[in-house]
Image (cartoon, rainbow, N blue to C red):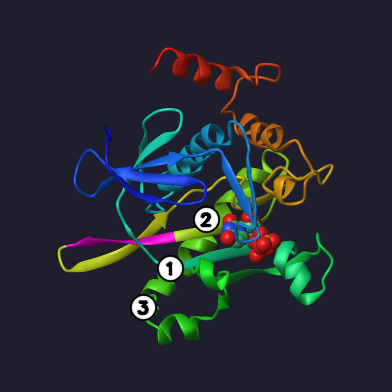
Amino acid sequence: MARRRQIYEGKAKILYEGPEPGTLIQYFKDDATAFNAQKKGTINGKGVLNNRISEHVFTMLGNIGVPTHFIRRLNMREQLIRQVEIVPIEVVVRNVVAGSLAKRLGIEEGTQLPRTIIEYYYKDDALGDPMVTDEHIACFGWASQEEMHDIADMAIRVNDFLTGLFAGINIRLVDFKLEFGRIWENDFSRVILADEISPDGCRLWDMTTNEKLDKDRFRRDLGGEVEAYQEVARRLGLLPAEGTETAVLDMESHRKKRGQ
Ligand code: UDP
């Protein structure tokens, strides 16, 4: 018997119908994919950590006035969110050269950019999420020019805030991906921040050692994925001090055994 209706299953998350109209439940899986899902794996405990990290980041962004879909965390793997109509654009913000930018333009990873770059990718797995410009977005009606203006504004605010937040815990915010969604109020719509912000969609490097504390550990077979995510959570003050890092996951398996 289905406990509730599944609305959508993505690579790392599942969306269920929420308790009230206009809400959804976002469930964080341990599944990890890379290179347009050609590489697949599991990072045990990742979902628990990303749920917590994303809750923290979205709450703080909400506090500085960035509208988000986040309502509240429900349990270790789930959060209640506002239902949005996802804008089919991945917004990538870059402060330092890495990943596809390094490859495409032949620039060394780690090169500091003289100014922040915003890139847009059309969300289409079959096409491998091609990079697009404002022109394509307007031409094909994926978002209006007004919406794109608001999206770029919010992306810069998120970047300014997160750069400082991570710098304060000795982490360099190299780049990250954001998604936005439309909400309707009467006949008007506005865009708000949606999806998640976690080491799955950010490049986070230790400022002293340049150690990667993000999904590149999985993409590049570096190992220590969960430890890296835990380190981010710990530095954000979301996990107890070192040595107790397995506590969260132990607690989860304990609760599962008790059928909670
Ligand atoms: N990113 C993401 N999902 C995607 C593509 C990129 O979350 O489908 C994030 C990625 O984690 C990185 C940033 O966006 O923080 C820039 O990624 P890039 O374009 O360098 O692509 P990648 O090297 O990940 O293929």
Question: Residue at coordinates 77% horizontally, 70% vertically from top-left?
Answer: 103
Q: Secondary structure at mark 3?
A: loop
Residue 121 visible in this rendered orientation of the protein: no
- Count of marks, rendered view: 3
Question: Image quadrant of residue 228?
Answer: top right
Q: Earlier in the sequence, mark 3 or mark 1?
A: 1
Question: In the image, is residue 69 above or below residue 44?
Answer: below
Q: Secondary structure at mark 1?
A: loop
What number is the disc on residue 158?
2
Q: Which region of the structure is painted magenta?
A: 180-185
List x then y, in percent, for residue 101: 72, 69
Tag 1: residue type?
Pro
Mark 3 Cα shell of 10 Å, populated few (<14), some (14-19), many (≥20): some
Q: Main secondary structure of the magenta part?
A: strand
Looking at the rendering, the quadrant in which ligand 1 lies is bottom right
Tag 3: residue type?
Ser
The residue under label 3 is 144
Which quadrant is the C terminus positioned in?
top left
Tag 2: residue type?
Val
Q: CA distance from mark 1 to mark 2?
A: 19 Å
Question: Image quadrant of residue 24?
Answer: top left
Please say if the residues under marks 1 and 2 sit with CB atoms less than 8 Å apart: no
The residue under label 1 is 88
Residue situated in front as seen by the camera: 155 or 79: 79
List x then y, in percent, for residue 35: 66, 60
List x then y, in percent, for residue 196: 48, 48
Q: Earlier in the sequence, mark 2 or mark 3?
A: 3
Q: Secondary structure at mark 2?
A: helix
List x then y, in percent, for residue 122: 50, 72
Mark 2 or 3: the one toward you = 3
